[in-house]
Image (cartoon, rainbow, N blue to C red):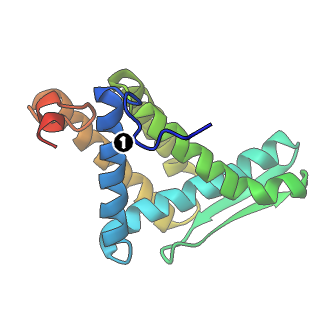
Amino acid sequence: MNPNWELKGCCNHDQKAFIITIAIFFLVILALWRTFLLTPFKLITVFLHEVSHAIACKLTCGQVEGIEVHANEGGVTKTRGGAYWLILPAGYLGSSFWGMLLVLASTNLLTARIAAGCLGVALLVVLFIAQNWTLRGLCIGFIIFLGVIWLLQEKTEVRILRCDEQLVLSL
């Protein structure tokens, strides 16, 4: 059995556009990794990491006493009880899971809108129960960011949440 390294016929137009888009995002993130531009996105990842600890704690009948996200890209989830052998790895597994869901949601305009709406609602809830100003500022910043993206999508010709066929063809 010989592998097909040419990959002829493996992907349709939309799949190729999606792979190219993900590759471009990867390269841009790699180039900007140590800059301040990615700090809000790193902090939202820390937030999702800590939320995953909290969800695992609640699912194992524990009590969440607080979640903190710090400006140095660190965070802590204070818990009491629950199954620690499930709570501890939930941060890394959970943030990977949330990232996967957001990438999958980005493949369709409706699911992208639903994901953006769910993230916005979650950020609003956290805004009112956050225990430190870094987390509150992060929530406010991302709520504004989601609102601007949504307005650009709906009120202008800029198509951030969906694939523009002419743009893909020019790649």
Compare residues 110 and 14 and report the one nearer the observer.
14
- In the depicted structure, whether residue 72 falls above or below residue 60: below
Residue 111: name its quadrant.
top left
Residue ID for mark 1: 19
Going 81% across and 54% down the picture, which residue do you hit? 87
Task: Tell me if 56 is positioned left or right of 134 in this view.
Answer: right
For this rendering, which residue is in front, 70 or 11? Answer: 11
Q: Is residue 52 above or below residue 169?
A: below
Q: Quadrant of the N terminus?
A: top right
52 left or right, relative to 104: right
Residue drawn at point x = 59 percent, y = 62 percent: 131
* Front-most of residues 29 and 62: 29
Place residue 147 in its image quadrant. top left
Q: Quadrant of the C terminus?
A: top left
Q: Seen in the image, is 81 located left or right of residue 99?
A: right
Amino acid marked by disc 1:
Ile
